[in-house]
Image: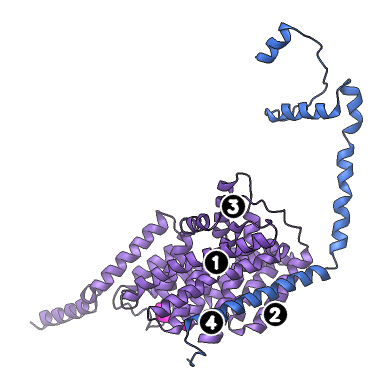
Chain colours: A blue, B purple
Amino acid sequence: MSQPVTTNPFIIMLINMTVVFLVLIALGLVIRLIHVLDPTVKKEKAPEIAPAPVEEAAPVPELPNSYDGVEPEIVAVIAAAVASMGGGNLKVRAVHPVEREGWKQSGRLGR
Amino acid sequence: MELINAFSVSLQAVWHDSGFFNFTMGNAIMILVGLVLLYLAIVKEFEPLLLGPIAFGCVLANFPNTGFMEDPGLMQAIHYGIANEIFPPLIFLGIGAMTDFGPLIARPSTLLLGAAAQIGVFVALVGAMLLGFNVQEAGAIGIIGGADGPTAIYLTIQMAPHLLGAIAVAAYSYMSLVPLIQPPVMKLLTTQKEREVVMEQLRPVTRFERLCFPIVSAILISLLLPPIASLLGMLMLGNIFRESGVMDRLSDTAQNSLCNIVTIFLATGTGLTMTAESFLVPQTLLIILLGLIAFIAGTAGGVIFGKIMCRVSGWKINPLIGSAGVSAVPMAARVSQVVGMKAKPGNYLLMHAMGPNVAGVIGTAVAAGTMLAMLK
């Protein structure tokens, strides 16, 4: 074994930590460089955007026929509430406003 | 009469050669230590895959007159694999095939956390030197703080082979105790507001980046630090097996069968170094104490640097991921996740913590490389 450069523990600590930081910073720069030079990045981005509107478009046409006079947002809220109760495969087919007042209505809500 | 004489001489020879005749109190204590470790591995499940063979290797090493280290045979072959640094790089091949560098590539700034957590290595080094260990022994003891078994064995064999048993046992024991050691340090050093920081989702990483990273980093680090070229080279080769997509069979072998086989040899061989003469010395207790200090200091270093990064990034980095910089993959990252979830349920830090976690593996290897270059 050859003689070490220094035996002062604090100097060893300082030098080694500096080297560790420098090497890992260099590695970080290499990662950034690879990212910048990546020739495949544009090709992969294109198909990601394309399928998104297709999925959203499907349920829209049904709305005016099935839910008479109720705002689509309200329908969404009601559907979400039903689903959150553990609905699983349930489908909300129709939403109708119930025009009843008085004791019967408040009795139903209270239950 | 002659028959009785020959009989008694032969019996005496058998008795004198037997383990019972040569059995010392030290052997008895070490067999007991081995059995306690075996209990911890099997019943308490402290890193059982490693501690199990280490423990039984320790029991085997303390049978007198076996000639394990003198006569050619399996035990000597296993020892050869450790003494000549064959097994740690092979384990790294498997680790490379298991490691996903994606979170690190997506957020390279987490490399700094992996570097900061290496402070534990050097705090223990300073402590060891102040306690009277020489510089090579202190370097080997310090590497316990890297929380990386193969690197600890790799460095210890080259700098202080007589301390291998104590250092390996301390490193693996503390690695299994990471969920107990780290959380109090993490909570002590962070505020509730810091622990609640929600981090942005990581960007997707392309196959090109995943493939280029191991190749370029192997070239860069091997040129900078040749003493760890075999360790880092095998790590990155394993990762190329994984990421190439065309070497699935090699990747599968590296991360399963080969890694398991080498683990058996490495761990058993480490246990075989735990003889009474080398382990039952006051230094062992100091090493175990310094190992704990190293783990605590490494965790603290990572978290404190995480706090700095939190401020610099405008509260976009949760300091809790800093503790994962001590390696101990993936246990340390899981600890960040658990502590983060306790502070704010639904805050998933696991993927973010994997960045500093794998950076810690590279950081520990680099720390070992600089120590080998400077102190050996």
> What label does residue B60 carry, if any?
none
State which quarter of the image contains the N terminus of chain B. bottom left
Q: Which residues are magenta?
A: B159-163
Which chain's residue wears label 3? Answer: B
Q: Is residue B137 left or right of residue A71?
A: left
For the point 65% across and 83% down, the residue is B224
Residue B190 part of the magenta segment: no
Q: To which chain does the residue with label 2 belong?
A: B
Does any portion of residue B77 appear in the rendered image?
no
Q: Which residue is mark 3?
A: B195
Q: Residues within 10 Å of mark 1 (few under 14, many from 20)?
A: many
Q: Which residue is mark 4?
A: B371
Inspect the image, locate mark 3, and give the three-letter code of the amino acid beneath it: Arg
Location of residue B104 in the rendering, given as x and y in whole percent from the top left corner? 68, 64
Real-space CA distance between mark 2 and mark 4, rounded to the nearest whole angstrom:
20 Å
Q: Are marks 1 and 4 in contact (CB under 8 Å)?
A: no
Q: For residue B219, which numbered disc appears in the image? A: 2
Please name the amino acid that badge 1 sits on.
Answer: Gly
Circles 3 and 1 on the same subunit = yes
Of the two numbered discs 2 and 1 on the same chain, state the one appearing first in sequence: 2
Give the crowd class for mark 4: few <14, some 14-19, many >=20 residues within 10 Å.
many
Query: Would you place residue A13 above or below residue A77 in this image?
Result: below
* Residue position for label 1: B301
Circle nearer the viewer, 2 or 1:
1
